[in-house]
Image (cartoon, coloured by chain):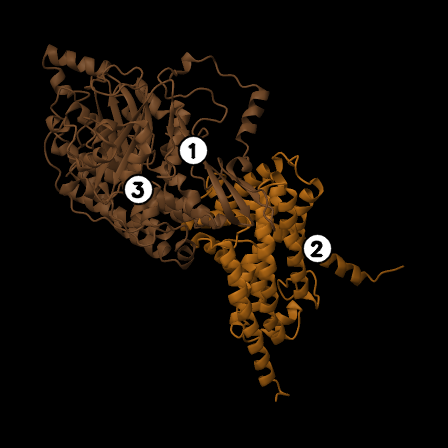
Chain colours: A brown, B orange
């Protein structure tokens, strides 16, 4: 229960006596580090740039190590007004490390001055730092010395400026109207052409000329606007370079000019197959900042819809996964099932894909009359269908031949690349936040965490079928034991406040008006919430400057590291294996590019 | 020079027959494009095309209008001559193969004693359509598709020929009418079951039908060798695929299911029924199976199918020698 929303007093501690902080202090000396008190639920430690690599190496190699670089990004601190007790900084780069063996996290922060925006790269310590550092360079213009390929990641290669800086405008109206000349278009296209030499690739070997095949950004199996350039010897993939950013919409930048409340719809569109699952980490983090404890009924409603969307997303996954293996029929069956799920979702939320239905301090509405009957129908419908998918497809000899021991990775490799969720559990590690760090009342539910053995394409497939069964179990428990009570917390920062109370009194009316028009003002602090989303661990790291809007919203999306890992597992395989691997990863590009 | 009037009449009748068969086969292939979609829909819990005309019956007309009036575009980087030639080969080689099919005791275009060999020759030429189409398109996906098609057809044609040698040995002839005649009493599917299995596999492979659709493999190669084709040139590849299905079905009926033979019903009805059943099997395969990986499929051809056909041929030879009146 390490992640239960801590009381305000407890969370203000700077965790100076945390064993990890103690170890860091012993190694680096008292002056090199400084603790910061936050609501993130983990020790946050500022280290100087000079000892950063040493500190990370210590954490990575200590007994019960921090195996995973969970997240790495930056904050432009120049406009932050409320930074009492924090080191001087124009920019901050933060490293969020996760330890499975300790089931603990730690965050390191490095302060940088505007005049000297450079850091040593940590790619040699954590391989998945590669893309994260490129993203920070792209978005903030911070240089990572020693990085193997520090180029733009999300923005086009020709882009000017660094969008997540505070002096970079967020609105289209602040720019000159966009024009594209013929020469401009040709220049953009030239910039997108793949240059093998820039990636240290040979065009030919002793006995063969390699073919460089551009797979995507428009390809039927790329699952969105995803491009991967393959170096082919015949049909064997010698090497490959994934290229992302075609679906980048600046979701993190948008958060800096939306009120805490009005940003919720943006979160739905990050992992667009996950619906309200995206709302959950955001509202949990915001509730921590606000100090809201939600009623039991809210927790159970949230769990129920989250699991329903998990089933829905896994069904989409299963259909497309099998379609990528060449089976054209299953996708029609799973879409029939998804329609059944949507009928329930529609009845409860009024929307289908993007309900944006969770609120800070509750959910938008109470459950409608008869919701339990609809849900029971769905629970009765699904199990025979899941059995049929297993019998018809997962037991099929061709499916097994295509997927067993193909594109496999071990638990260590998965952790080193930041892989989470079912793709990590397919390797045999049962790391599921719902069990390990229960949030929103998951500790009260009876369910199991299925794990695979080989970490191959097959395990990733059947694991999702098993996860659907467990989700149905959880939904069943929600239906049977739905607590009575309010669907919103009785708290001044609940947004929007309960409508019934607004009409009682002039004071409540004014509060309602202010909260809906300006939005709630959340206390200056930092908070973070992680949830087991459909595709892996989804985290929202919110920085509040005591205003109606977020100062910085960092979205840690699970699909991003999954794509980064592709070259490491696919080298030496065939084109067909790559397609099967892409289908088995379960990513959506909106979740990668944000 | 005077020509006997009976022979003029005979020639005219033969020509009329040939024309009727040509039109009939083309029509059947075209109708199959719609039938396949409706059948797939049936197995996939959906309706399929049902909006054009009563119950979707005019869908074919709509498709024809669309494909005929599409811009006939040749990419600037393509090799024009080969690019145009490829779909012609695709369709012509398959249409020519229908020459040898005996539809009924009296209907059929040519009655050659090289019958079956002619089909092998045409199937051999057919691979050039895919090869040239893929090569001339100047597209890497098309090239990969052509590469797959060539490798696949080469390996599967080897045992396709061998798989039928048992039938030829039993009938003692390459002529398809002789083969049908030899199935008096017992269809060849019984003594030649291995031959039937291997020929069916080879037939699916040679027509590039799922699960042997490696050259087009939408999920991998985004349509493969005909990725750059549009309009009627694409249409010819497309209809060619269905012609291939009809051809292989008709051949299997002729070689293993006694051709037009059957009680009570007229010969042509029997032939049509048997062919239709096989066509439905083709569609069902597509609805039911995932696609194996390309290299596994090749090794399946060489390691499983080829030995099977050789064993079949050997056993057939032994049986013929054993049972022949002048036996050992």
Give the left or right position of residue B313, taking residue A256 as reference.
right
Q: Which residue is mark 1?
A: A147
- Mark 2, residues whose alpha carbon is within 10 Å: few (<14), some, or many (≥20)? few
Task: Determine if marks 1 and 2 fall on one subunit.
Answer: no
Residue B311 vertical position relative to residue A343 in the rendered view, above or below? below
Please provide percent x and percent y for residue B159: 58, 65
Q: Are marks 1 and 3 in contact (CB under 8 Å)?
A: no
Residue A401 occupies quadrant: bottom left
Task: Determine if marks 2 and 3 fall on one subunit.
Answer: no
Q: Residue furthest bottom?
A: B328
- Mark 3, residues whose alpha carbon is within 10 Å: few (<14), some, or many (≥20)? many
Q: CA distance from mark 1 to mark 3?
A: 24 Å
Quadrant of the frame with the C terminus of chain B: bottom right
Query: Does dot 1 land on a helix, a strand or a loop?
Result: loop
Q: CA distance from mark 1 to mark 2?
A: 76 Å
Give the left or right position of residue A328, taking residue B151 as reference.
left
**Residue at figure coordinates x 46%, y 29% from the top left:** A151
Q: Which residue is mark 3?
A: A420
Using the rendered image of the protein, determine whether residue B45 is visible from the camera's viewpoint.
no
Q: Which residue is mark 2?
A: B16
Q: Nearer the viewer, mark 2 or mark 3?
A: 3
Task: Determine if marks 1 and 3 fall on one subunit.
Answer: yes
Please provide percent x and percent y for residue A527: 22, 27
Q: Residue furthest right?
A: B1
Query: Does dot 2 land on a helix, a strand or a loop?
Result: helix
**Residue at figure coordinates x 60%, y 62% from the top left:** B157
Residue B169 vertical position relative to residue B78 in the rendered view, above or below? below
């Amino acid at each position: 229960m390490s992640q239960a929303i801590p009381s305000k007093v407890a969370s203000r501690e700077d965790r100076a006596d945390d064993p990890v902080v103690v170890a860091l202090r012993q190694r680096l000396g008292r002056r090199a580090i400084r603790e910061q008190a936050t609501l993130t639920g983990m020790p946050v430690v500022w280290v100087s740039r000079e000892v950063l690599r040493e500190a990370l190496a210590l954490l990575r190699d200590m007994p019960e190590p921090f195996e995973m670089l969970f997240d790495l990004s930056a904050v432009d601190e120049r406009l932050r007004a409320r930074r009492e007790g924090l080191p001087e900084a124009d920019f901050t780069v933060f490293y969020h490390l996760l330890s499975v063996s300790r089931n603990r996290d730690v965050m390191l922060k490095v302060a940088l001055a505007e005049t000297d925006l450079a850091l040593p790269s940590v790619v040699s310590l954590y391989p998945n730092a590669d893309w994260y550092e490129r993203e920070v360079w792209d978005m903030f213009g911070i240089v990572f010395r020693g990085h193997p390929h520090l180029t733009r990641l999300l923005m086009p290669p020709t882009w000017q400026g660094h969008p997540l800086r505070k002096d970079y405008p967020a609105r289209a109206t602040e720019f000159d109207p966009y024009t594209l000349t013929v020469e401009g278009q040709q220049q953009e296209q030239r910039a997108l052409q793949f240059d093998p030499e820039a990636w240290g690739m040979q065009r030919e070997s002793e006995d063969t000329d390699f073919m460089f095949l551009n797979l995507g950004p428009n390809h039927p199996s790329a699952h969105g606007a995803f491009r991967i350039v393959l170096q082919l010897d015949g049909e064997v993939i010698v090497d490959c370079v994934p290229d992302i950013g075609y679906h980048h919409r600046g979701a993190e930048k948008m958060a800096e000019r939306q009120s805490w409340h009005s940003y919720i719809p943006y979160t739905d569109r990050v992992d667009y197959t996950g619906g309200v699952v995206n709302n959950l980490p955001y509202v949990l983090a915001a509730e921590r900042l606000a100090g809201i404890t939600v009623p039991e009924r809210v927790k159970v409603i949230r769990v129920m819809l989250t699991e329903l969307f998990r089933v829905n997303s896994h069904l989409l996954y299963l259909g497309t996964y099998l379609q990528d293996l060449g089976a054209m029929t299953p996708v029609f069956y799973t879409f029939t099932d998804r329609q059944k799920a949507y009928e329930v979702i529609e009845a409860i939320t009024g929307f289908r894909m993007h309900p944006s239905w969770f609120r800070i301090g509750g959910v938008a509405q109470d459950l409608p009359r008869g919701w339990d009957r609809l849900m029971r129908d769905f629970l009765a419908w699904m199990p025979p269908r899941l059995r049929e998918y297993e019998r018809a497809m997962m037991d099929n000899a061709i499916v097994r031949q295509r997927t067993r021991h193909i594109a496999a990775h071990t638990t260590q490799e998965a952790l080193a690349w930041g892989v989470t969720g079912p793709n990590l559990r397919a390797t045999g590690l049962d790391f599921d936040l719902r069990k390990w760090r229960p949030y929103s009342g998951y500790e009260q539910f009876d369910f199991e965490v299925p794990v695979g053995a080989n970490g191959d394409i097959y395990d990733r497939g059947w694991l999702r079928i098993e996860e659907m069964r467990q989700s149905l179990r959880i939904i069943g428990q929600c239906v049977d034991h739905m607590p009575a009570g309010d669907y919103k917390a009785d708290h001044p920062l609940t947004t929007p406040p309960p409508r019934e109370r607004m009409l009682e009194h002039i004071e409540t009316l004014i509060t309602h008006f202010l909260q809906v028009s300006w939005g709630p003002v959340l206390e200056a602090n930092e908070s973070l919430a992680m949830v087991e989303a459909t595709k892996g661990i989804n985290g929202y790291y919110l920085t509040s400057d005591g205003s109606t809007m977020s100062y910085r919203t960092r979205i840690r999306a699970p699909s991003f590291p999954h794509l980064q890992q592709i070259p490491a597992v696919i080298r030496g395989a065939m084109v067909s294996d790559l397609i099967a691997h892409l289908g088995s990863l379960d990513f959506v590009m909106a979740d990668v590019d944000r | 020079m005077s020509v006997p009037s009976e022979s003029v009449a005979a020639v005219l009748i033969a020509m009329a027959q040939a024309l009727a068969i040509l039109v009939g086969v083309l029509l059947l292939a075209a109708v199959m494009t719609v039938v396949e979609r409706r059948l797939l829909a049936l197995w996939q819990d959906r309706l399929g095309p049902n909006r054009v005309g009563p119950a979707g019956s005019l869908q074919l007309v709509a498709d024809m209008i669309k494909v005929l009036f599409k811009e006939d575009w040749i990419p600037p980087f393509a090799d024009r001559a080969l690019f145009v030639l490829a779909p012609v080969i695709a369709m012509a080689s398959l249409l020519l193969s229908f020459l040898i099919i005996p539809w009924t005791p009296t209907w059929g275009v040519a009655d050659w004693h090289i019958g079956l060999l002619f089909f092998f020759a045409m199937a051999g030429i057919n691979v050039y359509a895919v090869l040239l189409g893929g090569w001339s398109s100047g597209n890497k996906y098309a090239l990969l598709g052509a590469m797959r098609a060539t490798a696949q057809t080469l390996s599967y044609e080897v045992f396709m020929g061998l798989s039928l040698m048992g039938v030829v040995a039993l009938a003692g002839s390459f002529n398809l009418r002789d083969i049908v005649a030899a199935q008096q009493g017992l269809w060849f599917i019984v003594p030649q079951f291995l031959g039937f299995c291997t020929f069916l596999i080879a037939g699916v492979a040679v027509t590039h039908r799922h699960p042997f659709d490696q050259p087009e493999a939408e999920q991998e190669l985004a349509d493969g060798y005909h990725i750059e084709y549009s309009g009627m040139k694409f249409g010819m590849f497309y209809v060619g695929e269905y012609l291939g299905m009809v051809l292989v079905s008709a051949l299997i009926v002729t070689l293993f299911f006694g051709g037009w033979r059957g009680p009570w019903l007229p010969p042509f009805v029997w032939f049509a029924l048997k062919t239709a059943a096989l066509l439905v099997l083709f569609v069902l395969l597509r609805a039911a199976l995932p696609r194996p990986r390309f290299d596994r499929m090749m090794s399946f051809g060489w390691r499983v199918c080829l030995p099977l056909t050789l064993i079949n041929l050997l056993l057939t030879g032994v049986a013929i020698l054993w049972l022949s009146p002048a036996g050992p």
